[in-house]
Image (cartoon, helix red, strand yellow):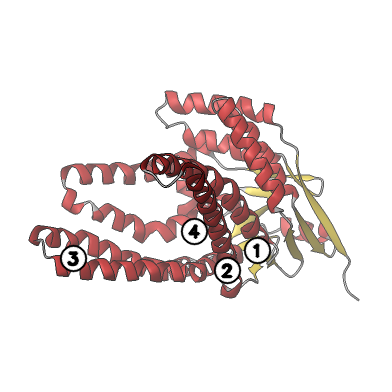
Amino acid sequence: MSEPTQTLDIRFTGSGSEYFRIWIVNLLLTLITLTLYWPFARARRLAYFQNNTLVGKDPLGFHGDPWKMFRGYLLMLLFGVSYWVVSNFAPALSWIPLLVLAGLWPALWRASLQFRLRNTSWRGVRMSFEGDLKGAYLCMLPFFIPVLAFGLVVALIVPDLQASKDGAAGAMIASAMSLLVMAMVAMSPWLMARVKQYQHGGYVFAQEHAQLKAGAGAFYGFSFRVAGVSLLCTAVLAGVGGIVVLMLGSSTGATMVVLPLLLALGYLVFPLVLVPYTTSRLQNLLWSNTRSARIHFDSQLKFAPLMSLTAKNWLLIALTLGLYWPFAKVHTARLRLEAMEIAVRGDVNAWLAQAQGGDKGLLGDAAGDFFGIDMGL
Protein backbone atom coordinates (compact mmCIF):
# COMPACT_ATOMS: atom_id res chain seq x y z
CA MET A 1 0.00 0.00 0.00
CA SER A 2 1.52 3.32 -1.07
CA GLU A 3 1.90 6.13 1.45
CA PRO A 4 -0.30 9.24 0.98
CA THR A 5 1.31 12.34 -0.52
CA GLN A 6 0.88 15.77 1.02
CA THR A 7 1.56 19.00 -0.90
CA LEU A 8 3.15 21.85 1.05
CA ASP A 9 2.75 25.29 -0.49
CA ILE A 10 5.43 27.92 0.06
CA ARG A 11 4.34 31.42 1.06
CA PHE A 12 6.33 34.54 1.81
CA THR A 13 4.82 36.86 4.41
CA GLY A 14 7.42 39.63 4.50
CA SER A 15 6.55 43.21 3.62
CA GLY A 16 8.56 45.92 1.94
CA SER A 17 8.00 48.43 4.75
CA GLU A 18 9.27 46.00 7.41
CA TYR A 19 12.34 45.06 5.41
CA PHE A 20 13.03 48.71 4.55
CA ARG A 21 13.64 49.46 8.24
CA ILE A 22 16.09 46.54 8.50
CA TRP A 23 17.77 47.47 5.23
CA ILE A 24 18.31 51.15 6.00
CA VAL A 25 19.81 50.40 9.42
CA ASN A 26 22.04 47.71 7.91
CA LEU A 27 23.17 50.08 5.18
CA LEU A 28 24.01 52.92 7.56
CA LEU A 29 25.89 50.71 10.04
CA THR A 30 27.82 49.01 7.22
CA LEU A 31 28.92 52.41 5.90
CA ILE A 32 29.79 53.78 9.34
CA THR A 33 31.89 50.72 10.24
CA LEU A 34 33.64 50.63 6.83
CA THR A 35 31.85 47.35 5.92
CA LEU A 36 32.75 45.56 9.19
CA TYR A 37 29.05 45.39 10.11
CA TRP A 38 28.28 43.55 6.84
CA PRO A 39 28.17 39.99 8.36
CA PHE A 40 25.76 41.17 11.07
CA ALA A 41 23.63 42.89 8.44
CA ARG A 42 23.61 39.70 6.40
CA ALA A 43 22.54 37.63 9.41
CA ARG A 44 19.63 40.01 10.07
CA ARG A 45 18.58 39.87 6.42
CA LEU A 46 18.74 36.07 6.24
CA ALA A 47 16.79 35.74 9.49
CA TYR A 48 14.08 38.08 8.19
CA PHE A 49 13.65 36.34 4.86
CA GLN A 50 13.77 32.81 6.28
CA ASN A 51 11.48 33.56 9.22
CA ASN A 52 8.94 34.93 6.75
CA THR A 53 9.15 31.90 4.43
CA LEU A 54 6.37 29.47 5.34
CA VAL A 55 6.57 25.86 4.16
CA GLY A 56 3.09 24.54 4.74
CA LYS A 57 2.13 26.72 7.66
CA ASP A 58 5.47 26.64 9.46
CA PRO A 59 8.29 29.16 8.96
CA LEU A 60 11.91 28.39 8.28
CA GLY A 61 14.35 29.34 11.00
CA PHE A 62 17.81 30.84 10.75
CA HIS A 63 20.25 30.20 13.61
CA GLY A 64 23.52 31.55 12.22
CA ASP A 65 25.81 33.28 14.71
CA PRO A 66 26.81 36.66 13.22
CA TRP A 67 30.11 36.56 15.12
CA LYS A 68 31.03 33.36 13.30
CA MET A 69 30.02 35.01 10.03
CA PHE A 70 32.27 37.92 11.03
CA ARG A 71 35.26 35.56 11.26
CA GLY A 72 34.46 34.28 7.77
CA TYR A 73 34.23 37.83 6.49
CA LEU A 74 37.62 38.70 7.99
CA LEU A 75 39.12 35.66 6.29
CA MET A 76 37.83 36.77 2.88
CA LEU A 77 38.87 40.36 3.63
CA LEU A 78 42.39 39.11 4.35
CA PHE A 79 42.55 37.57 0.86
CA GLY A 80 41.42 40.86 -0.66
CA VAL A 81 43.98 42.92 1.26
CA SER A 82 46.74 40.43 0.40
CA TYR A 83 45.94 40.72 -3.28
CA TRP A 84 45.91 44.53 -3.10
CA VAL A 85 49.29 44.64 -1.33
CA VAL A 86 50.97 42.19 -3.71
CA SER A 87 49.49 43.76 -6.87
CA ASN A 88 50.64 47.24 -5.80
CA PHE A 89 54.10 46.44 -4.43
CA ALA A 90 55.03 43.31 -6.40
CA PRO A 91 52.86 43.22 -9.54
CA ALA A 92 54.78 40.29 -11.02
CA LEU A 93 53.59 38.14 -8.11
CA SER A 94 49.95 39.28 -8.14
CA TRP A 95 48.87 35.89 -9.47
CA ILE A 96 49.95 34.12 -6.25
CA PRO A 97 47.03 35.28 -4.00
CA LEU A 98 44.60 34.48 -6.82
CA LEU A 99 46.11 31.01 -7.19
CA VAL A 100 45.83 30.41 -3.44
CA LEU A 101 42.20 31.56 -3.44
CA ALA A 102 41.42 29.38 -6.46
CA GLY A 103 42.96 26.39 -4.69
CA LEU A 104 40.91 27.01 -1.53
CA TRP A 105 37.69 28.00 -3.31
CA PRO A 106 36.03 24.52 -3.42
CA ALA A 107 36.70 24.05 0.31
CA LEU A 108 35.38 27.54 1.12
CA TRP A 109 32.30 26.94 -1.04
CA ARG A 110 31.59 23.65 0.72
CA ALA A 111 32.06 25.29 4.14
CA SER A 112 29.60 28.01 3.07
CA LEU A 113 26.98 25.42 2.13
CA GLN A 114 27.51 23.56 5.40
CA PHE A 115 27.17 26.71 7.47
CA ARG A 116 24.02 27.91 5.71
CA LEU A 117 22.21 24.57 5.77
CA ARG A 118 23.04 23.59 9.33
CA ASN A 119 21.77 26.96 10.50
CA THR A 120 18.44 26.57 8.69
CA SER A 121 15.58 24.65 10.30
CA TRP A 122 11.96 23.73 9.71
CA ARG A 123 9.66 22.60 12.51
CA GLY A 124 12.59 22.27 14.90
CA VAL A 125 14.73 20.06 12.64
CA ARG A 126 18.00 21.41 11.26
CA MET A 127 18.98 20.87 7.66
CA SER A 128 22.52 19.86 6.70
CA PHE A 129 24.90 19.60 3.79
CA GLU A 130 26.82 16.33 3.52
CA GLY A 131 28.80 16.74 0.31
CA ASP A 132 32.40 15.71 0.98
CA LEU A 133 35.52 17.79 0.37
CA LYS A 134 36.81 15.46 -2.35
CA GLY A 135 33.55 15.83 -4.27
CA ALA A 136 33.78 19.64 -4.07
CA TYR A 137 37.22 19.62 -5.70
CA LEU A 138 36.32 16.97 -8.28
CA CYS A 139 33.18 18.78 -9.46
CA MET A 140 35.15 22.01 -10.03
CA LEU A 141 38.36 20.46 -11.36
CA PRO A 142 37.39 20.71 -15.07
CA PHE A 143 36.93 24.46 -14.59
CA PHE A 144 40.17 25.12 -12.73
CA ILE A 145 42.43 23.34 -15.21
CA PRO A 146 41.69 25.69 -18.17
CA VAL A 147 41.53 28.70 -15.86
CA LEU A 148 44.95 27.81 -14.45
CA ALA A 149 46.33 27.39 -17.98
CA PHE A 150 44.82 30.74 -18.99
CA GLY A 151 46.27 32.46 -15.94
CA LEU A 152 49.73 31.02 -16.53
CA VAL A 153 49.67 32.17 -20.15
CA VAL A 154 48.71 35.69 -19.12
CA ALA A 155 51.16 35.90 -16.22
CA LEU A 156 54.22 34.22 -17.69
CA ILE A 157 54.13 34.36 -21.49
CA VAL A 158 52.29 37.51 -22.53
CA PRO A 159 54.70 39.98 -20.80
CA ASP A 160 57.69 38.37 -22.56
CA LEU A 161 55.92 38.61 -25.91
CA GLN A 162 55.09 42.24 -25.34
CA ALA A 163 58.74 42.94 -24.52
CA SER A 164 60.02 41.13 -27.59
CA LYS A 165 57.30 42.54 -29.85
CA ASP A 166 57.13 39.21 -31.72
CA GLY A 167 53.97 39.58 -33.77
CA ALA A 168 53.81 35.99 -35.02
CA ALA A 169 54.25 34.51 -31.56
CA GLY A 170 51.70 36.96 -30.18
CA ALA A 171 49.17 35.90 -32.80
CA MET A 172 49.74 32.24 -31.89
CA ILE A 173 49.17 32.95 -28.22
CA ALA A 174 46.05 34.98 -29.01
CA SER A 175 44.71 32.07 -31.09
CA ALA A 176 45.46 29.58 -28.32
CA MET A 177 43.72 31.77 -25.76
CA SER A 178 40.71 32.14 -28.07
CA LEU A 179 40.48 28.37 -28.40
CA LEU A 180 40.74 28.05 -24.63
CA VAL A 181 37.90 30.53 -24.11
CA MET A 182 35.72 28.70 -26.66
CA ALA A 183 36.45 25.38 -24.94
CA MET A 184 35.43 26.86 -21.59
CA VAL A 185 32.18 28.19 -23.06
CA ALA A 186 31.44 24.78 -24.62
CA MET A 187 32.15 23.07 -21.28
CA SER A 188 30.14 25.47 -19.13
CA PRO A 189 26.77 23.59 -19.23
CA TRP A 190 28.51 20.32 -18.35
CA LEU A 191 30.40 22.07 -15.56
CA MET A 192 27.20 23.64 -14.26
CA ALA A 193 25.56 20.21 -14.21
CA ARG A 194 28.48 18.78 -12.16
CA VAL A 195 28.43 21.65 -9.68
CA LYS A 196 24.66 21.62 -9.19
CA GLN A 197 24.53 17.82 -8.90
CA TYR A 198 27.10 18.01 -6.12
CA GLN A 199 25.34 20.93 -4.44
CA HIS A 200 21.78 19.60 -4.55
CA GLY A 201 23.00 16.06 -3.91
CA GLY A 202 24.43 17.16 -0.57
CA TYR A 203 21.17 18.57 0.82
CA VAL A 204 19.88 16.51 3.75
CA PHE A 205 16.78 17.03 5.89
CA ALA A 206 15.50 14.54 8.43
CA GLN A 207 17.63 11.74 6.94
CA GLU A 208 16.23 12.53 3.48
CA HIS A 209 19.15 12.83 1.05
CA ALA A 210 18.28 14.90 -2.02
CA GLN A 211 19.43 14.25 -5.57
CA LEU A 212 19.40 16.35 -8.72
CA LYS A 213 17.96 14.18 -11.49
CA ALA A 214 18.83 16.59 -14.32
CA GLY A 215 21.92 15.60 -16.30
CA ALA A 216 24.28 17.48 -18.58
CA GLY A 217 21.82 17.20 -21.50
CA ALA A 218 19.21 19.24 -19.61
CA PHE A 219 21.77 21.96 -18.89
CA TYR A 220 22.90 22.07 -22.52
CA GLY A 221 19.25 22.46 -23.55
CA PHE A 222 18.88 25.28 -21.02
CA SER A 223 22.03 26.97 -22.34
CA PHE A 224 20.88 26.71 -25.97
CA ARG A 225 17.52 28.29 -25.08
CA VAL A 226 19.25 31.13 -23.23
CA ALA A 227 21.57 31.64 -26.22
CA GLY A 228 18.51 31.70 -28.50
CA VAL A 229 16.86 34.41 -26.42
CA SER A 230 20.13 36.37 -26.44
CA LEU A 231 20.31 36.14 -30.24
CA LEU A 232 16.67 37.22 -30.48
CA CYS A 233 17.40 40.29 -28.34
CA THR A 234 20.41 41.07 -30.53
CA ALA A 235 18.31 40.71 -33.68
CA VAL A 236 15.67 43.07 -32.30
CA LEU A 237 18.32 45.66 -31.45
CA ALA A 238 19.86 45.28 -34.90
CA GLY A 239 16.42 45.76 -36.46
CA VAL A 240 15.83 48.92 -34.44
CA GLY A 241 19.23 50.20 -35.52
CA GLY A 242 18.43 49.46 -39.16
CA ILE A 243 15.13 51.32 -38.95
CA VAL A 244 16.82 54.36 -37.42
CA VAL A 245 19.50 54.33 -40.14
CA LEU A 246 16.82 54.17 -42.83
CA MET A 247 14.98 57.09 -41.24
CA LEU A 248 18.08 59.26 -40.82
CA GLY A 249 20.05 58.12 -43.85
CA SER A 250 23.50 56.51 -43.93
CA SER A 251 25.59 59.40 -42.73
CA THR A 252 28.08 60.16 -39.98
CA GLY A 253 25.35 61.92 -38.01
CA ALA A 254 23.13 58.84 -38.20
CA THR A 255 25.95 56.67 -36.89
CA MET A 256 26.48 59.07 -33.98
CA VAL A 257 22.79 58.67 -33.09
CA VAL A 258 22.42 54.91 -33.67
CA LEU A 259 25.37 53.70 -31.61
CA PRO A 260 24.40 55.42 -28.31
CA LEU A 261 20.77 54.45 -28.93
CA LEU A 262 21.67 50.77 -29.39
CA LEU A 263 23.92 50.82 -26.32
CA ALA A 264 21.12 52.32 -24.22
CA LEU A 265 18.55 49.84 -25.53
CA GLY A 266 20.96 46.94 -25.02
CA TYR A 267 21.53 48.05 -21.44
CA LEU A 268 17.76 47.83 -20.91
CA VAL A 269 16.75 44.88 -23.08
CA PHE A 270 19.30 42.31 -22.00
CA PRO A 271 18.86 42.69 -18.20
CA LEU A 272 15.07 43.06 -18.49
CA VAL A 273 14.59 40.10 -20.84
CA LEU A 274 17.57 37.77 -20.66
CA VAL A 275 18.10 37.85 -16.89
CA PRO A 276 14.45 37.07 -15.95
CA TYR A 277 14.32 34.35 -18.61
CA THR A 278 17.55 32.76 -17.35
CA THR A 279 16.47 33.04 -13.72
CA SER A 280 13.04 31.48 -14.25
CA ARG A 281 14.26 28.62 -16.43
CA LEU A 282 17.20 27.80 -14.17
CA GLN A 283 15.05 27.79 -11.02
CA ASN A 284 12.53 25.48 -12.67
CA LEU A 285 15.27 23.19 -14.01
CA LEU A 286 17.00 22.84 -10.65
CA TRP A 287 14.11 22.54 -8.25
CA SER A 288 11.71 20.52 -10.40
CA ASN A 289 14.44 17.88 -10.62
CA THR A 290 15.48 17.91 -6.95
CA ARG A 291 13.99 15.09 -4.90
CA SER A 292 14.61 12.44 -2.29
CA ALA A 293 12.76 9.25 -1.44
CA ARG A 294 9.97 11.16 0.34
CA ILE A 295 10.38 14.78 -0.80
CA HIS A 296 9.84 16.13 -4.31
CA PHE A 297 10.26 19.82 -5.13
CA ASP A 298 8.49 21.53 -8.00
CA SER A 299 8.93 25.02 -9.45
CA GLN A 300 6.69 26.73 -12.01
CA LEU A 301 8.21 30.22 -12.12
CA LYS A 302 6.87 32.05 -15.19
CA PHE A 303 9.04 34.28 -17.35
CA ALA A 304 6.43 36.98 -18.15
CA PRO A 305 5.49 37.85 -14.51
CA LEU A 306 9.15 37.91 -13.51
CA MET A 307 10.05 40.17 -16.44
CA SER A 308 7.15 42.50 -15.63
CA LEU A 309 8.13 42.66 -11.97
CA THR A 310 11.78 43.27 -12.88
CA ALA A 311 10.82 46.19 -15.15
CA LYS A 312 8.61 47.67 -12.42
CA ASN A 313 11.34 47.26 -9.79
CA TRP A 314 13.97 48.92 -11.96
CA LEU A 315 11.72 51.86 -12.77
CA LEU A 316 10.78 52.50 -9.14
CA ILE A 317 14.38 52.04 -7.95
CA ALA A 318 15.48 54.68 -10.47
CA LEU A 319 12.64 57.09 -9.54
CA THR A 320 13.31 56.75 -5.79
CA LEU A 321 17.12 56.97 -6.17
CA GLY A 322 17.55 53.45 -4.81
CA LEU A 323 15.16 53.63 -1.85
CA TYR A 324 12.74 51.15 -3.47
CA TRP A 325 15.46 48.45 -3.40
CA PRO A 326 14.20 46.61 -0.26
CA PHE A 327 10.64 46.60 -1.60
CA ALA A 328 11.94 45.12 -4.87
CA LYS A 329 13.79 42.39 -2.97
CA VAL A 330 10.65 41.45 -1.05
CA HIS A 331 8.41 41.36 -4.13
CA THR A 332 10.95 39.30 -6.09
CA ALA A 333 11.40 36.84 -3.21
CA ARG A 334 7.62 36.41 -2.94
CA LEU A 335 7.21 35.71 -6.66
CA ARG A 336 10.07 33.22 -6.78
CA LEU A 337 9.22 31.39 -3.56
CA GLU A 338 5.48 31.13 -4.16
CA ALA A 339 6.14 29.59 -7.58
CA MET A 340 7.39 26.52 -5.70
CA GLU A 341 5.74 23.71 -3.83
CA ILE A 342 6.90 20.54 -2.08
CA ALA A 343 5.25 17.12 -2.31
CA VAL A 344 5.94 14.97 0.77
CA ARG A 345 5.17 11.26 0.88
CA GLY A 346 4.16 9.68 4.17
CA ASP A 347 3.41 11.03 7.64
CA VAL A 348 5.48 14.20 8.00
CA ASN A 349 5.01 14.37 11.78
CA ALA A 350 6.27 10.80 12.24
CA TRP A 351 9.56 11.09 10.39
CA LEU A 352 10.21 14.60 11.73
CA ALA A 353 9.79 13.29 15.28
CA GLN A 354 12.23 10.50 14.48
CA ALA A 355 14.73 12.98 13.01
CA GLN A 356 14.66 15.20 16.12
CA GLY A 357 16.24 12.38 18.09
CA GLY A 358 19.45 12.38 16.06
CA ASP A 359 19.75 15.67 14.27
CA LYS A 360 23.11 15.67 12.49
CA GLY A 361 22.69 19.27 11.33
CA LEU A 362 23.52 20.59 14.81
CA LEU A 363 27.17 19.54 14.55
CA GLY A 364 28.80 19.16 11.15
CA ASP A 365 32.21 20.29 9.97
CA ALA A 366 34.10 22.16 12.69
CA ALA A 367 36.12 24.39 10.37
CA GLY A 368 33.13 25.61 8.41
CA ASP A 369 31.19 26.25 11.59
CA PHE A 370 34.08 28.07 13.26
CA PHE A 371 34.72 30.45 10.39
CA GLY A 372 31.02 30.97 9.63
CA ILE A 373 31.70 31.24 5.90
CA ASP A 374 28.59 32.31 4.02
CA MET A 375 28.90 33.20 0.35
CA GLY A 376 25.21 33.53 -0.42
CA LEU A 377 25.06 30.19 -2.24
Which residue is the site of mark 3? 170
Q: Residue furthest right?
A: 1
Q: Quote the CA–CA distance across marks 1 and 3.
A: 42 Å
Which residue is the site of mark 2? 219
Closer to the observer: label 2 or label 3?
3
Q: Which mark is residue 110?
A: 4
Could you tell me which secondary element the residue under label 4 belongs to? Answer: helix
Q: Quote the CA–CA distance across marks 2 and 3.
A: 35 Å
Could you tell me which secondary element the residue under label 3 belongs to? Answer: helix
Earlier-in-chain disc, 2 versus 3: 3
Q: Tell me the residue at 36%/42% (across/down).
A: 252
Residue 2 lies, with reference to residue 53, above or below; the image says below
Position in image of residue 293 (x %, y %): 74, 70
Q: Quote the CA–CA distance across marks 2 and 1.
A: 8 Å
Q: Tell me the residue at 65%/32% (across/down).
A: 327
User: Is the residue under label 4 in contact with that under label 3 (CB below 8 Å)?
Assistant: no
Which residue is the site of mark 1? 285
Seen in the image, is 60 located left or right of residue 198? right
Amino acid type for the residue under numbered disc 1: Leu
Hey, which quadrant is residue 301 in on the image? bottom right
User: Is the residue under label 1 in contact with that under label 2 (CB below 8 Å)?
Assistant: yes
Q: Residue furthest left?
A: 164
Q: Nearer the viewer, residue 293 or 170?
A: 170
Q: Nearer the viewer, residue 346 or 367?
A: 346
Amino acid type for the residue under numbered disc 4: Arg
Position in image of residue 231 (x %, y %): 53, 60
Seen in the image, is 176 located left or right of residue 304? left
Seen in the image, is 224 located left or right of residue 48? left
Closer to the observer: label 4 or label 1?
1
Query: What is the crowding at mark 2: few (fewer than 14 residues within 10 Å), some, or many (at least 20)?
Result: many
Could you tell me which secondary element the residue under label 1 belongs to? Answer: helix
